[in-house]
Image (cartoon, rainbow, N blue to C red):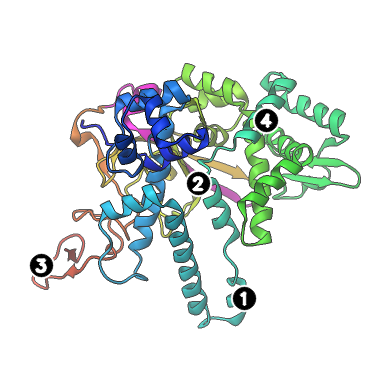
Amino acid sequence: MRARKVFAGRKIRTIRTQAGLTQQAFAAQLGISTSYLNQLENNQRHITAPVLLALADVFSVDIKDLSGNEDDRLLADLSEALADPLFSGDAPPSQDLKLVVQNTPAVAHAFLSMHQALRRAGERLAELDDTLERTGAQADPTPYEEVRDFFHYMDNYVDWLDRAAEDLAGQIDSGRADRTRALAGFIEAQHGIRVVIGGEASRPGALRHYDRHARVLSLNPRSSAATHAFQIAHQLALTAHSDAIGEIVRKADFRSKDAEAVCRIGLANYFAGAAVLPYGAFLAAARELRHDLELLAERFGASIEQVAHRLSTLQRPGLKGVPFFFARVDQAGNITKRHSATKLQFARFGSACPLWNVHSAFEAPNRIIRQLAETPDGIRYLCLATTVTKPGGGYRAPVQRYALALGCEVRHATELVYADDLDTVHDEAFEPIGISCRICERHDCHQRAVPPLKHKLTVDELARDTVPYGFE
């Protein structure tokens, strides 16, 4: 397969300016000419292997950091936004979009912010036909969307919190059976917070309740030991690292107080997950067990969802794991959690592709199902999916059901136990999937729900195929 050319001008320029060097001095240390460096920084030439090795050797740059994952995510978001009917006329050529992402990412982010504002304005106008009260409810940006994008562009990895959580795990230093007791003892000894199973958290639907005056953390007795440990670690984050979390939130410059509050919870959850599954130990175990979800969950006393989500966050510079995508999908096809360290980017609007195996997971509960898939850009993936059920307790209590999706590019498949007996060579083994019908350009998809945007329809009254229209 032909290697993808990498243009990393902005990143090379950042490395040079952080080193405080002129182009001439920087080029000399890399062993290249000043004119060649100028071309690299302006994305007129792609970066070559000798330059990559020189950057790694002289400036201790992680070669993977120049691979363009962030640019891929931004390019995917920009392409989807421009496909919106809000923008009339032909979309800019893909090469023009790449230049914008590579050279002026701030402009791309500003455009995405404008697009989201336009969509919100349109939604508010549509709500006027229903009720003025609903219009008021939609007046501010959706806090969850704002926070989700924050983690999305942080690569779902927060270095300081991750290392602090790993340090906590080292201080606890207990086996999985004693983790909850060890965390409870730690939070009481260090912060005077007593942990009780029951109390205020016994009501249906509750997981955790903290009484700040009595300094008592109540946990639901029906929750698993993995959930108890996670909730104690969550409270530790809010108690021991409140200032650091507050500083991260302040720098994020959210547009609403609600988004700030949601982000604080998200960061505390991040810390909890990293404490239960500490980076170094978890990465080593993942490699040893070849990313077997069930064995990893058993070894760390964690849930399958905690393990799958943690695998998608192993993006520490210099010590990265397999780049995974991760998503949680409800039975209606709504993506309630999403993150991708791969080129696969989830649709920001609408439902996920119906051909994706995450939907089939509901038909095969308690099993991990596999799929070899290819997206319209020609990238091939190994996709895993399974269901999780979260009972509320009691016959009449509601039950939450979700499907979890985890996957990686097929070039990493040999590192996963799930690929051992799969045919990853022949084209016919890969099922064509898309991101969302509204932006997918596949002509022959039998599951297409709506026509693609920005394409003129062709309707033949004398013939009928599976889908009752074609498009140019």
Which residue corresponds to mark 4?
A: 165
Image check: 4 left or right of 310? Answer: left
Mark 2 and mark 1: Cα distance apart in space: 29 Å
**Tally of numbered discs:** 4
Residue 413 lies within the magenta run: yes
In the picture as drawn, the residue positioned furthest to the top comes out as 288
Q: Earlier in the sequence, mark 2 or mark 3?
A: 2
- The residue that disc 3 covers is 463
Q: Which numbered disc, 4 or 3, marks the residue that appears first in the sequence?
A: 4
| Element under disc 3 | loop
Check residue 136 in the rendering and tell me which mark sits there, or answer none. 1
Identified by mark 1, the residue type is Gly
Q: Amino acid at mark 2?
A: Tyr
Query: Which segment is the magenta one?
Result: 393-422
- Answer with left or right where residue 107 lies relative to residue 469: right
User: Which kind of residue does numbered mark 3 sit on?
Assistant: Ala
The residue under the point 52% across, 18% down is 284
Label 2 or label 3, whichever lies nearer to me, is: 2
Going from the N terminus, do you reach mark 1 or mark 3 first?
1
Which residue was labeled with disc 2?
153
Q: Quick check: 302 left or right of 99?
A: right
Of badges 4 and 3, the one in the foreground is 4
Residue 125 is situated, as x and y percent measured from the top left of the image, at: 49, 79
